[in-house]
């Protein structure tokens, strides 16, 4: 055994040296020596060549296959480390560059080809001479999308998927949220992805075909780079489709849950920018999946972090050593049971595993959302001066009577900044600086006398009016510590023109009162004795979301904006309330 482990570590180091990256470590589960094959070609149904690296046990026999299809290159994002460990454990691991990315041919366009190419890849992998015909898929973020889209196509040899930290609707949870553009993510992701598009363009321009007879050799243009035109065309397509139309529906997982016929292990994070998508995928396939195996075979794990960072320290909060969860080992135990038939206890474990903040403990549950959690309404109260931390805003379970409105001026030229939350590099951060602004309304409960758990979906019912035809409303749930630290837990946004439907914009009538329901996503947090629950309300969270310009024009294409006065009502006839699921 020691000799095999030494051999595997040497192979790991050699691969890493060739690829110019740091060496990786093979885990203690290794049982097999490993064969590594680079850039193995596969033809898609329309003749495009996709290339994959294959890690497999160097012994006779047939093994189950795990596939990772990635736009981020085969050599990062866990490809080598995962491949070495999985092969040592008795799996064939295939990591493939998706269409148009790195070593694979064809033209890249997000989501468009993943269903058909995923189907073709699964069936190709199942027919390999060392495959036993059972195929699973793994990976996070966009690699989760490649799994779900492939599962929609229902390849016969696909047995399970393990999508992590990914969306269920690429309009609502990838490009937009509540009708507002997820600006920072959309621009960072599309710009980063476009770099390899430029590489592909430059590869085609590498042959010296641009001689100029009138120029001396010293003035030869080594590369004709051209312009950025044509790169990242999908980003501009997203701007052209701000509503939930057929452009989005054709690739929406939510529209096709009934086509997914396999068990799935979903990973999510409370501060992950795709938190809602992970939960909705779990619930959607569980309730609507296309087979009994799919409906009964859904599992959900929700960690504290995600794209914002890994435990234990996320943002400004240390969740403790116990918050670290070995997702790889849990995933492999699940696949050991699903693909190898090993009775390792997985079948008897509860399907939902969540990290409960505040208490900072992991807990297994029978379902999500928790049946025992009861929705409690915390009503907004003030004497009309809830602006900022120094205001008089309060939350309580008492119904409001006759109370004055709260109002604030939202200026797109000075938007409320993003600080923490479900954003790259965000996580739990102290909101007091943001809450000190006059364009933020702050409502806080009295200190809890005993520990109070809020676990499940959170929503906000607001009665509003505006001086403009369109504006945004943002709600933020905060845990206030005895020392004043204001830990953001979760939040949500609604662009008023999409208040009735994400499919059709409807402008406001200035001054008219409307009832809005804002999805603040979900959380699991114990408000410890002495802590307070807080709600912040504002109209911008920039640059996480693009600024609403408060006009009838498209915020995605216009630059002209106006200031607006937004009004929140909380009286007997307009009982604005934060709704949280309290666990007895």
Image: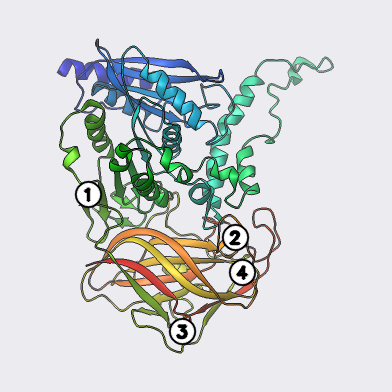
Q: Earlier in the sequence, mark 3 or mark 2?
A: 2
Residue furthest top in the image? 60
Q: Nearer the viewer, residue 89 or 149?
A: 149
Residue matched to label 3: 571
Q: Is residue 217 above or below residue 531?
A: above
Q: Earlier in the sequence, mark 3 or mark 4?
A: 4
Question: Which is more foreground, mark 3 or mark 2?
Answer: 3
Residue furthest right in the image? 214
Find residue 175 and report its horizontal and vertical position in percent.
54, 48
Find residue 371 and report its horizontal and vertical position in percent.
26, 60
Q: Is any atom of residue 237 visible in this view?
A: yes
Q: Earlier in the sequence, mark 2 or mark 4?
A: 4
Disc assigned to residue 547: 2
Find residue 194 and report its horizontal and vertical position in percent.
58, 35
Split into 4 quadrants, where in the image is the N terminus?
A: top left
Quote the CA–CA distance across marks 3 and 4: 26 Å
Residue at coordinates 24% horizontally, 46% vertically from top-left?
A: 351
* SS at circle 1: helix
Quote the CA–CA distance across marks 2 and 1: 38 Å
Q: Residues within 10 Å of mark 2 (few under 14, many from 20)?
A: many
CB contact under 8 Å: marks 3 and 4: no
Question: Which is more foreground, mark 3 or mark 4?
Answer: 3
CB contact under 8 Å: marks 1 and 4: no
Quote the CA–CA distance across marks 2 and 4: 9 Å
Q: Is any atom of residue 53 visible in this view?
A: no
Q: Nearer the viewer, residue 493 or 191?
A: 493
């Amino acid at each position: 055994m020691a000799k095999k482990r030494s051999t595997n570590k040497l192979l790991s180091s050699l691969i890493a040296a060739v690829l110019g990256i740091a060496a990786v470590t093979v885990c203690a589960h290794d049982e097999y020596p490993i064969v590594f094959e680079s850039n193995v070609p596969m033809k898609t149904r329309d003749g495009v060549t996709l290339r994959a690296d294959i890690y497999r046990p160097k012994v006779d026999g047939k093994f189950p296959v795990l596939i990772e299809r990635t736009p981020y290159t085969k050599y990062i994002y866990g490809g080598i480390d995962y491949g070495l460990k999985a092969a040592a454990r008795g799996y064939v691991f295939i990591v493939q560059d998706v269409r148009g990315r790195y070593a694979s041919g064809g033209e890249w366009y997000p989501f468009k080809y993943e269903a058909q190419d995923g189907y073709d890849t699964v069936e190709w992998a199942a027919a390999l001479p060392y495959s036993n015909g059972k195929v699973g898929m793994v990976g996070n973020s966009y690699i989760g999308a490649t799994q779900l889209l492939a599962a929609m196509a229902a390849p016969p040899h696909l047995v399970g998927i393990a999508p992590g930290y990914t969306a269920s609707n690429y309009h609502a949870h990838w490009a937009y949220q509540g009708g507002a553009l997820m600006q920072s993510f959309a621009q960072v992701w599309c710009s980063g992805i476009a770099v390899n598009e430029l590489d592909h363009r430059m590869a085609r321009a590498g042959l010296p075909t641009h001689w100029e007879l009138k120029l001396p050799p010293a003035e030869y243009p080594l590369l004709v780079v051209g312009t950025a035109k044509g790169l990242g065309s999908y980003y501009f397509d997203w701007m052209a489709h701000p509503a939930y139309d057929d452009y989005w529906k054709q690739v929406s997982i939510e529209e096709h849950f009934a086509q997914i016929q396999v068990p799935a292990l979903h990973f999510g994070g409370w501060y992950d920018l795709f938190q809602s998508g992970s939960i909705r995928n779990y619930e959607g396939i569980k309730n609507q999946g296309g087979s009994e195996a799919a409906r009964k075979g859904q599992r959900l794990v929700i960690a504290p972090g995600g794209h914002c960072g890994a435990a234990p320290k996320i943002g400004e909060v240390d969740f403790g050593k116990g918050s670290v969860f070995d997702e790889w080992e849990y995933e492999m135990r699940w696949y050991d049971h699903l693909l190898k038939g090993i009775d390792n206890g997985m079948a008897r474990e509860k399907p939902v595993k969540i990290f409960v903040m505040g208490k900072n403990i992991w807990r297994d549950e029978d379902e999500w959302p928790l049946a025992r959690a009861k929705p409690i309404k915390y009503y907004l109260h003030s004497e009309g001066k809830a602006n900022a931390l120094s205001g008089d805003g309060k939350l309580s379970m008492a119904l409001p009577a006759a109370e004055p409105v709260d109002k604030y001026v939202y200026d797109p030229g000075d938007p409320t900044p993003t600080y923490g939350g479900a954003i790259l590099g965000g996580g739990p951060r102290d909101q007091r600086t943001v809450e000190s602004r006059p364009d933020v309304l702050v409502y806080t409960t009295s200190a809890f006398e005993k520990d109070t758990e809020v676990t499940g979906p959170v929503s906000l019912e607001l009665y509003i009016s505006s001086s403009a035809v369109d504006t945004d409303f943002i709600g933020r749930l905060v845990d206030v510590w005895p020392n004043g630290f204001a830990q953001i837990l979760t939040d949500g946004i609604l662009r008023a023109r999409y208040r009735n439907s994400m499919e059709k914009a409807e402008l406001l009538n200035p001054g008219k009162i409307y009832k809005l329901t804002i999805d603040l996503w979900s959380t699991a947090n114990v408000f410890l004795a002495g802590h307070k629950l807080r709600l912040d309300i504002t109209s911008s969270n920039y640059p996480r979301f693009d600024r609403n310009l408060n006009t009838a024009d498209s915020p995605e294409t216009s630059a002209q904006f106006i200031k607006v006065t937004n009004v929140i009502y909380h009286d007997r006839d307009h009982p604005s309330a934060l709704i949280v699921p309290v666990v007895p």
